[in-house]
């Protein structure tokens, strides 16, 4: 976990330095973008109300499939397979609080949808870990994705705030261990990269 936090911090700092060097461009009223995050691929439509404030309508997700990693959950171990899927949409407001630093954004919004997970142990025991309650809140910081014409690139880090997952399975102690892990808590971290076009 420490390595992920350090890597994320380093990427955010590099992105900040890069985007801070962007020159002046013509303002855009609208934008479209495609993104990728732990919650799947997404497509966004943006309305730039002002140079400082943009409203995004975003839809995203990914079909249920095997997870590329099986993190160690204390009390469960790493001897299991994990399948995950998601489908969601949301409305987000990006605000650029600094007049001369329009590459820096505060991002907040709400989303509706679902995130589903099935953890299957080698014994055959299954645990479903599903986020089904709506809506959920989002708060994060971003760099890039300015409200300008032409191609834009953005990088975001933030947190999704939920009521927590519904966990079902045969062993109460393991259900408690899953619910207490950072991977399946009520606050989920988000890293996102966006490529867009303003017009």
Image (cartoon, rainbow, N blue to C red):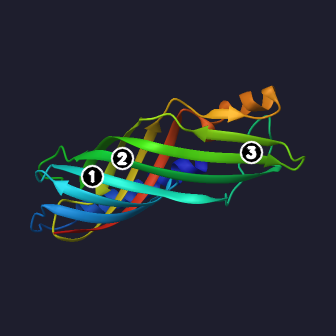
Compared across the picture, whether 161 is left or right of 80 comes to left
In the rendered image, residue 96, in percent from the top left (x then y), is placed at 20, 47
Q: Which residue lies under the disc numbered 3?
A: 72
Q: How many marks are shown on the rendered structure?
A: 3
Badge number at residue 116: none
Give the quadrant of residue 25.
bottom left
Identify the residue at horizontal 40%, vertical 62% (top origin): 35
Identify the residue at horizontal 44%, vertical 56% (top origin): 60
Instruction: Name the image quarter holding the N terminus.
Output: top right
Marks 3 and 1: in contact by CB < 8 Å? no
Instruction: Name the image quarter holding the C terminus.
Output: bottom left
Q: Residue furthest right?
A: 123
Q: Which residue lies under the disc numbered 1?
A: 56
For the residues labelled 1 and 2, the Cα–Cα distance comes to 8 Å
Compared across the picture, whether 81 is left or right of 164 comes to right
Sequence order check, earlier mark of 1 and 2: 1
For the residues labelled 3 and 2, the Cα–Cα distance comes to 31 Å
Compared across the picture, whether 132 is left or right of 126 comes to left
Q: Is residue 77 above or below residue 21?
A: above
Q: Is residue 152 above or below residue 6?
A: below
Foreground pick, 69 / 89: 89
In the rendered image, residue 14, in percent from the top left (x then y), is placed at 38, 60
Q: Is residue 138 above or below residue 193?
A: above
User: How crowded is the residue under tag 2: few (<14 C-alpha within 10 Å), some, or many (20+)?
Assistant: some
Nearer the observer: mark 3 or 2; the answer is 2
- Helix, strand or loop at disc 3? loop
Identify the residue at horizontal 39%, vertical 55% (top origin): 59
Q: Which residue lies under the disc numbered 2?
A: 90
Q: Is residue 25 above or below residue 2?
A: below
Sequence order check, earlier mark of 1 and 3: 1
Foreground pick, 152 / 23: 152
- Helix, strand or loop at disc 1? strand
């Amino acid at each position: 976990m420490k390595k992920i936090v350090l890597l994320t911090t380093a990427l955010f700092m590099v992105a900040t330095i890069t985007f801070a060097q962007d020159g002046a461009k013509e303002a855009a009223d609208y934008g479209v973008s495609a993104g990728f995050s732990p919650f799947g691929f997404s497509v966004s439509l943006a309305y730039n109300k002002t140079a400082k404030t943009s409203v995004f309508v975003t839809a995203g997700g990914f079909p249920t499939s095997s997870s590329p990693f099986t993190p160690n959950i204390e009390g469960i171990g790493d001897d299991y397979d994990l399948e995950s899927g998601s489908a969601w949409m949301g409305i987000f407001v990006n605000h650029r609080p600094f007049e001369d630093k329009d590459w820096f954004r505060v991002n907040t919004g709400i989303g509706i949808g679902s995130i589903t997970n099935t953890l299957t142990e080698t014994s055959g025991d299954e645990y479903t870990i599903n986020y089904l309650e709506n809506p959920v809140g989002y708060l994060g910081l971003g760099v890039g994705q300015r409200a300008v014409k032409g191609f834009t690139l953005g990088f975001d880090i933030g947190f999704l705030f939920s009521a927590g997952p519904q966990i079902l399975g045969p062993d109460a102690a393991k259900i408690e261990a899953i619910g207490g892990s950072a991977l399946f808590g009520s606050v989920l971290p988000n890293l996102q990269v966006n490529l867009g076009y303003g017009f």
